[in-house]
Image: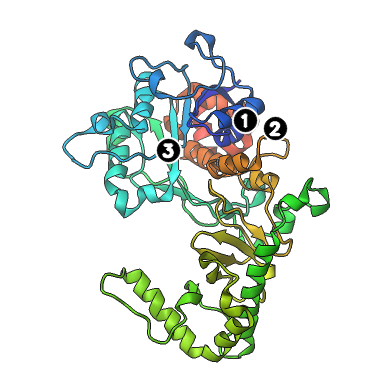
Amino acid sequence: MTFKFIDLFAGIGGFHAALEPMGGQCVFASDIDEAARKIYEVNWKVHSQKKYGISKVAGDIVPLTEKEVQVPNHEVLVGGFPCQPFSKSGYQRGMDETRGTLFWNILKILEAKTPAIVILENVRNISGPRHRHEWNVIIRSLRDLGYKVSDQPAILSPHLLPPEKGGTPQVRERVFITGTYVGRDKAWAHSDVEPVVINQPMYGWNTDYWNLDKHLLENDSEIKNLVEYQITAEEEYFLAVWEDFLQSIKKSGKIEKLPGFPLWADDFVIDPKLPRSLPDWKKDFLVKNSAFYKEHKKVIDAWKKRHDNLKGLPASRRKFEWQAQDASSIWECVIQFRPSGIRVKKSTYLPALVAITQTSVIGSRRRRITPREAARMQGFSDTFSFGDQPDRYTYKQLGNAVCAGVVKEVFLSHVSRDFKELPKKFKDLLLASNHQDDVTKRNTVQLRLIG
């Protein structure tokens, strides 16, 4: 027995990777990106019901929802929807205010098909103060359609889950909006419901237990075309210059570790210029850089002289951000070559994958993470195939993906919270799935009720 789900804005299938092993059957998937659709089809072999005229993963969802909702019936709707700007007028309500956004197309499907559960994913910023209006519109619109949702975002990062629960060594905070269909009156009556997860370590997991060699990295000897992932001689030079800086400062004996604010070598001056038009954040950094330079002037001047006043470093590589606390060397850390400078972090867990070229460098390996390692960070199995597409497409797709282990945790927590209100058929499907133990452990009392 299976429950049916549809996968909107599906990418390469992070939601699919979580729900299929729990008994889910994908009956419809869509994504506007052709390359991502191909990878989805290769790995998941999705063929939706022919009566809707769809034999492969659909592209643009808009034409399939504007006049008539052309998607199959389903019990669960999931999707990492794009957060387009909503109207700020405040005069409209519900679906009218979301017209012209892709969230409106989701609402059209919910209105027409009324699945038991909806789970939507987005970046954390969607629930921040700058987007309070958009957040309120989303929550209000879902309640108007009869979905019980929390006012508070459910936020979780994969590094907060232990490996056996689907966690991975990646800091990737994402917001989940989870709802159960209960009817409009109940949805508004239960507006004080708690979010299904809290952004903190779970199951007694200590995030210091993460070990990249053990939990993520491939053996270099097994990596085909290893040279393609190794840093260039130029990049190694940039890092060697800053390694010399780090060791010189430490040997001076004045401080045990570098400060956490960005160090701008071009702004190591005694009296920085602070025009009124300069943003406050930049003034603050300039003042801090000046104070740091004054304290370590002799060491810094000698360092710059040794490296020809940094003429071999482009502007973005003369900026350095140390987030590695008491680490003893750059080469034992994780490094990112960012447009804003070189960032160095401790090598416990990695920064979030992004859909641009900021692939993390493992200092001890002097190479970037491979596509396979990036896939592991998002919870995809080693059998997941990216075919022969260029790595840049793979990194982009993984940067846009959702972590499968986090989805599983959110889904099971949501089912646990709202178990009494789920349709009996859906409960039976869950209990018949391969993950019935995950459900029963969370719902001992509720399960006695359905006998």
Q: Secondary structure at mark 3?
A: strand
Picture layout, residue 169 above or below residue 46: below
Q: Tell me the crowding category of disc 2: few under 14, some 14 to 19, or many 20 or more residues within 10 angstroms, Cα based.
A: few
In front: 348, or 358? 358
Q: Position of residue 202 (x, y in %)?
A: 56, 54
Q: Tell me the crowding category of disc 3: few under 14, some 14 to 19, or many 20 or more residues within 10 angstroms, Cα based.
A: many
* Residue 171 makes an appearance in the image: yes
Front: mark 1 or 3: 1
> Could you tell which of marks 2 and 3 lies nearer the N-terminus?
3
Q: Is residue 338 left or right of residue 82?
A: right
Q: Secondary structure at mark 2?
A: loop
Q: Is residue 192 left or right of residue 206?
A: left
Which quadrant of the figure contains the N terminus? top right
Kindly identify the residue that appears in the image at 24 percent across and 29 percent down. Answer: 96
Are circles 2 and 1 on residues that touch, CB within 8 Å?
A: yes
The amino acid type found where label 2 is placed reads: Gly
What residue is pinned by disc 2? 387
What residue is pinned by disc 1? 39
* Residue 23 makes an appearance in the image: no
In front: 343, or 409? 343
Q: Is residue 125 left or right of residue 134?
A: right
What residue is pinned by disc 3? 178
Task: Please identify the residue farthest to the left as the structure is shown.
Answer: 91
Q: Secondary structure at mark 1?
A: helix
> Could you tell which of marks 2 and 1 lies nearer the N-terminus?
1
> Could you tell which of marks 1 and 3 lies nearer the N-terminus?
1
The amino acid type found where label 1 is placed reads: Ile
Q: Position of residue 252 (x, y in %)?
A: 61, 90
